[in-house]
Each structure stands twice: as C-alpha cells, then as structure tokens.
C-alpha cells in the first residue's frame, strides 16, 4: 500500500464531534492506503494561548511563546489518537521532538531542516497510524519552535516528501480551490485541478486555503497535494505536478490580498547593490517583501518601492529608518491602504495580450493601477484597498471564469 | 548560593493574576538563593483535558491519555517563564523530555527512575531560572508518562534530591500542616515543624497538603521540605529531617481518610504465602492496600481483611474474584462505608498507653472500632464512615492538640 498524508486543520478538529468525524474518515481511508495524519490545534485554541501570554506582555519571550502555543497540537493529536483507538484503530500521537522534526531556531517563523522518518516508519510497521503534531519543530538543542501561522500545511507536505508519499491531502473547511473568493464573486467556480505553479502564485497572493510554504515544499519535492473538505464528501482540487491539459485556460484564477502596505524610499542614490542594501536587512528579520518596483534613475537618484503585509509595517519601517545613513535616501513614504490583485494561469505563457486586456477592464471601471509586477504565469497589480472587490469582480468576468 | 526548589500547585498558578504573583515571589527569592521552579497545571486544566478524553471513551488509550494531560504543565511552565521574563528575570521552561526525567512506562502511575541534572545546571549557569513541568516524565522510548495525581510534589522533591538542594518549598493554598483538618476541628493548630516520619504517616493517611510519594522521596534522600502558602506570607511548616525536640508531643496530629473500602476474604485456607497470593496481584496493578489484618487460624482457615481506596474497589474485587481458585476462600465481603483515623507522633515511641487512651476516648463516644493497626509512631483505626468527624474531634481533644 502507498502512504498518504492527511492533514486536518483547526476547524476540522474544532470539537469533540469533529474529531470523532475525522477519526471515521481516517479509519475509512486506512483500508485503501497507509495513512499518516498531521493535525492543527482545535480551532480557537492557539488564539486562546496567545491571549494568555499577552496578559503578561505584548512581546512575550519568543522561546516560551513557541513552547506555549505548540501545546494546542499536542492536545488535538492525542485526542484524535484516543478517538481512533476507541473505534478499534491503533494510533500513536507523535510530537515534533519524537520524530526529530529539526528546524532553524527563529522562533515563530522557524524553517524545517530535517525529519527523522525512521520513527514514523517504525510506528506504521508496528501497525499504528502516526498522528503528528503540525506547526512545530525542535531546534538542535531540543527547544520547541513553531513554523508560523498555517505551518501545519508545511509540516504535512514536508512529511509527505520525506516519506515519499503518494499524495498529501489537506483537509479543511472548504471543498477546494475556486477561481476566486466566492464571498466576493458568487459566480466563482471550483477547480478540479490546478498546476503547482499556479497554486504557488495563488497561495502567495492570498488564496488562504493552503499556506504558500507548503506549496513551495510540494513544488520542490514533487508531492501531489489535494485540497478537500473534511465536512462533506468530494474530491476537492488536485494541485497537480504537471500541466495535464494542453488547452489550459488563459487565466485559472484571481487571487487578492488586503492588509498590505506600500513603502517607498524616495531619492535613493542609485549605486550597485542598493536593492540588496534595502531588502537584505528585511529578509534577515524574516519580513516577506512582495511587489518590488524601481524607477529609472534621474540624476543618479531613483525611487524604490515595495510592499509588505500590514503586520510587518512597523518592523520594516524601523529597519529602513535605522539604516538611513547607509541607504542614502531622502524620504520614506508609507501607503497603508493598498491591496494586491493577481491574475494567475499557466496559459498566459503562450498568449500575449492578457495584461492589456486586464488593464483595459480596470480602466473601464475607473480603477487606478499604482504598481504592476509580472511573471511568466502571473500579473499582479497594486491598487487602492477600497477598489479590491470591484477589481476582482470585473477581472473575473473579463476572463470568463464564471463559465 | 544554595539551590532551593520551589513547587507551585494548581491553585497557586490558577489564573493570570496568580502566575504574576508567583513570578514576583520567585523574583524575590532569587535574590537569596538559586531557584529552580516546578509547576503544576493551572487549576481545573487537567480535569478539563480528562473530560475531553472521556468524551470518546471511558477508557482512553493510556499512552495518549498521558500525552494529553501532560500538556497542562507545559502551558503553565511557559506562562510563568513569560511572566518572569516580562519583569526582567530570565527564565526557561523545561519539559520532562528536555531534562530527561526518565520514568517507568506504567502510564498514569509512572515512577521516576532518573533525572539528567546537567541540563538544569547548565540553565542555571546560563543565568536562567529553570521552570520545570511537574507531574510528568518520559519512558526510555521518549513516550510521555504522568506520575499520578499530585505527582508534581514528587517531581519537585526528586529534583531537589537530584540537585542536592538546600530545601524544597511546596507552595500551596494552605499555610502549613495542622494538627488535623481545621474544617472538622476549628481548634486545630498549625505546626511550625513536623518530622519526616510523622509527615509520612500523616500524608499516607490523608493529609492532602502534600503527596505521600513526595515525602517518601524526601525521607529517602534527606531533602528538607517546607509546606507554605503562595497566597499569604508566612514560614509554613518545615518537614524536618531530625527530631530536634526531645520533648516531642505524644501525638503531633490526627489524619483521617474517607472513601475507603474494607475487603474481607472469609474462610481462606491458611497456607504459607497466602498473604502474598492475595496482595501480590493487587500490587502488580498498582493498587495500594492499606490496613491489613489476618485473624488467628481456626481449623486451618482464617479471615483476611484489608482496605483500599474507593476508586480501586472495582479492580481490586475483580482481581480477587478472578483468583478464587488459587486463593481457596469461601466468600468475599465488601464494606464500602468505612474511614480510617490515625494518631501520629514520634513521641509515641517512648510513651506507652497512647493506644488505650485513644480507645477509651472512642468508647466513651460510642464509636465502634472495626480494625486496628499500629506502628512505632502511628495508631490507625478503621471505623464506620459516619463517625469520622466525631472520632477526630474527640481524639484531638483527648491529646490536647488545641493547646
């Protein structure tokens, strides 16, 4: 039998009833494949732990904060093992330290370095279904770390890659990936499959169904991932390794992300290495910088603009300001009310004119474009946040995604 | 500076406010001694986790049950470390696996085998106060175990012994050990000190302030233990290693325990090894048997009586019944409404007549004695449960404990 990794998110294990339902689902799947389970904390639990810590200080000690919030998955993994055991299926909860899930020591944003698969494989050989705590790891010194919000997806895909699993099934509370957010565009349609590259761009730009790092991992290690619902039957959306269909749609989906901040360094002296000089220190602090635009130089000076998510606004601007002398800029401008909208589709590669068609549609709807960034299979525009829904709706219609 | 181990029970860390108060207490103590902290789960948390598990089955898988309930101390240890850090005191939570607190693998009733003090000592050397999770350990395979209810006391004393600490302070919600339960006898007085032996007998017979295993550990490894309140200032009661006072009181205190069951095997064939034959299988299941009485043999047959706590009644009787053929008894009689009352005091050793004075007092109060068991420093009587308070009151008065 092949190994299939099943990951259950917070809402999927959000109550005793849900855990019992997941146990039945795992039991059924275990007839067909060797199942390895990865669980998130019961929904709400992680926030409850965070709130407890914040009672003492807004900046809790980072090592302790990670040790604290990691307990949520320990609870849910043991509860699921108890639920499985109670219906006759042998199961063993395994913590990050028990499977030597080694990570870097950047607390709350740790990166996976290595997994010892022998413990998991031995557990399977002994006839138990391993129930692994998502979202966490341990440093080389055995201190507990967490992978950041949504990190359980990454755990699941990393384990699937490590075990050379046939597939990684991400169970959640939606039944698959849609052409865009159905709450914004009611005509949005579920996709049966999407390529890994498209998903990578979708996830990166705010399709919240699966964490971007998980898709990156899946892409790197060629793990087929399926996104499906633990609440209702259905085959979900397969994130495929290959472009099966030669007749790919031009645009597969539209992703968008609010809560973005645009930071412009005005009057930067245009010397070699200036982009690295600006972005290097941000990257060192694990701040993800997205759309980056540098204007042509006038009189040896240029403007350098990039976006970060709103939660990183303060630390990003502090870093930029601390480096004012080294960076030699005149001024920093912050625009805290922007959003990003992205068209994604492998079909774009072979078809010109997608960009101009998108810009035309936006112009007809009086939506001003502030920044543009393109890749082979993606066009991202930065617009005023209040136009987000309007832009998504008109683009969804322009590219016939409701058909 | 000497090392002092401070253990905080569930009520002492029962809320954010309590944890903040404990952090201040630890901070203050850290000026005088090197502090190592052991914590219980926040009060109510362990029961909450047990209830979660019992939703699935009345007999949850034992490995998973222990992994589940052990998370409570992980939460409180990290929270206390965060609280200390927020007031400028460096602290590190350490789990059982991080300090290699090795135990047997009898889940929920595990026994401590070994502790690796190097991690704790290194943490102290690095300038951090170690905050250790009580109540739990790990097997040689790294599976989480728990030590049973009140196990955090045992953790604290075991660590104090391991580190050769000057003292182990058990912080709780009472301000010390009393001559008897003040809720039953309002005249009960707090003792400034009590010998380890006396405490061992007191704890064993139901003084719930500290767990008996902890006192046994302290006795074995000569760790002075102090019981005191984390809610109000005071020096508590010192459980001393030596009998400092030659003029020891005859009786230091009166302990009592309800929820006991008396089990009598009637008509047992009196052969060598019969006591072991009866009690061995109970001990194998970790059932604690207390007062044991065997009558003189008549016609090669005898009655064999012992007490167990009410929670072990079912398993004890099942074991006895399963062994009926081997044990060759005629009948099993169960009396589920008894209690034990004990007089404890090192002074008894050198003074005759304590027993007869006690029996006289009970007789004058119409309290019938069902069983008697004596040791050098203790007299235990088994009586009908309804007479418990009456017996404790009259004995407290008889031996002038209110003076």
Image (cartoon, coloured by chain):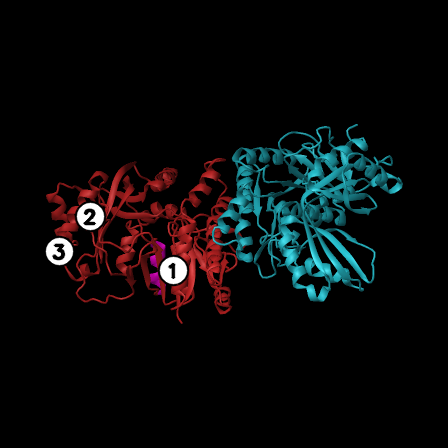
Chain colours: A cyan, B red
| Distance from the alpha carbon under mark 2 to that under mark 3 | 27 Å
Q: Which residue is mark 1?
A: B25
Q: Which stretch did the figure color magenta? A: B212-221
| Secondary structure of the residue carrying numbered label 1 | helix
Answer few, some or many: residues within 10 Å of disc 2's Cα (few below 14, many 20 plus, some between 14 and 19): few
| Secondary structure of the residue carrying numbered label 2 | loop
Give residue B170's position: percent from left, percent from top: 35, 57
Name the mark nearer the viewer: 3 or 1: 1
Prevailing SS of the magenta stretch: helix
Q: Which sits earlier in the primary sequence, circle 2 or circle 3?
A: 2
Give residue B16's position: percent from left, percent from top: 43, 50
Circles 3 and 1: CB atoms closer than 8 Å: no
Q: At 15% from the left edge and 41% from the top edge, which residue is drawn?
A: B367
Q: Chain of mark 1?
A: B
Q: Which sits earlier in the primary sequence, circle 1 or circle 2?
A: 1
Circles 1 and 2: CB atoms closer than 8 Å: no
| Distance from the alpha carbon under mark 3 to that under mark 1 | 46 Å
Q: Which residue is mark 3?
A: B353
- Res A2 visible: no
Whether B215 is among the magenta residues is yes
Q: Chain of mark 3?
A: B
């Amino acid at each position: 039998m092949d190994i299939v990794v099943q990951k259950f998110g917070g809402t999927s294990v959000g109550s005793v009833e849900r855990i019992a339902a997941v146990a039945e689902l795992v039991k059924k799947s275990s007839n067909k494949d060797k199942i390895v389970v990865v669980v998130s904390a019961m929904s709400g639990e992680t926030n409850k732990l965070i709130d407890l810590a914040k009672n003492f200080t807004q900046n809790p000690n980072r090592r302790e904060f990670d040790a604290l919030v990691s307990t949520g998955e320990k609870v849910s993994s043991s509860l699921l093992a108890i639920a499985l055991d109670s219906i006759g299926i042998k199961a063993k909860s395994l913590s990050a330290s028990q499977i030597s899930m080694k990570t870097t020591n950047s607390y709350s944003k740790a990166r996976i370095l290595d997994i010892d698969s022998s413990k998991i494989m031995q557990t399977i050989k002994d006839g138990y279904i391993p129930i692994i705590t998502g979202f966490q790891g341990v440093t080389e010194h055995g201190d507990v770390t967490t992978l950041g919000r949504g990190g359980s997806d990454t755990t699941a895909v990393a384990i699937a890659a490590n075990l050379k699993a046939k597939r990684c099934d991400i169970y959640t509370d939606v039944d698959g990936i849609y052409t865009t957010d159905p709450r914004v565009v009611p005509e949005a349609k579920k996709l049966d499959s999407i390529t890994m590259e498209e998903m990578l761009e979708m996830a990166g730009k705010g399709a919240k169904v699966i964490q971007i790092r998980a898709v990156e991992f899946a892409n790197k290690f060629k793990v087929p991932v399926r996104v499906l619902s633990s609440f209702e039957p259905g085959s979900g959306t397969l994130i495929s390794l290959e472009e099966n269909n030669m007749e790919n749609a031009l645009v597969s989906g539209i992703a968008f992300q609010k809560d973005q901040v645009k930071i412009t360094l005005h009057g930067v002296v245009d010397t070699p290495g200036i982009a690295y000089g600006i972005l290097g220190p941000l990257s060192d602090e694990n701040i993800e910088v997205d759309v980056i635009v540098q204007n042509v130089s006038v009189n040896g000076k240029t403007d350098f603009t990039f976006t970060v998510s709103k939660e990183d606004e303060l630390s990003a601007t502090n870093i930029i300001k601390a480096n004012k002398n080294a960076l030699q800029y005149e001024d920093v401008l912050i625009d805290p009310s922007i959003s990003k909208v992205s068209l994604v589709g492998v079909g774009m590669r072979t078809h010109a004119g997608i960009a101009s068609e998108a810009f035309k549609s936006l112009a007809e709807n009086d939506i001003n474009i502030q920044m543009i960034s393109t890749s082979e299979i993606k066009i991202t525009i930065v617009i005023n946040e209040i136009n987000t829904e309007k832009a998504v709706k008109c683009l969804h219609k322009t590219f016939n995604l409701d058909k």
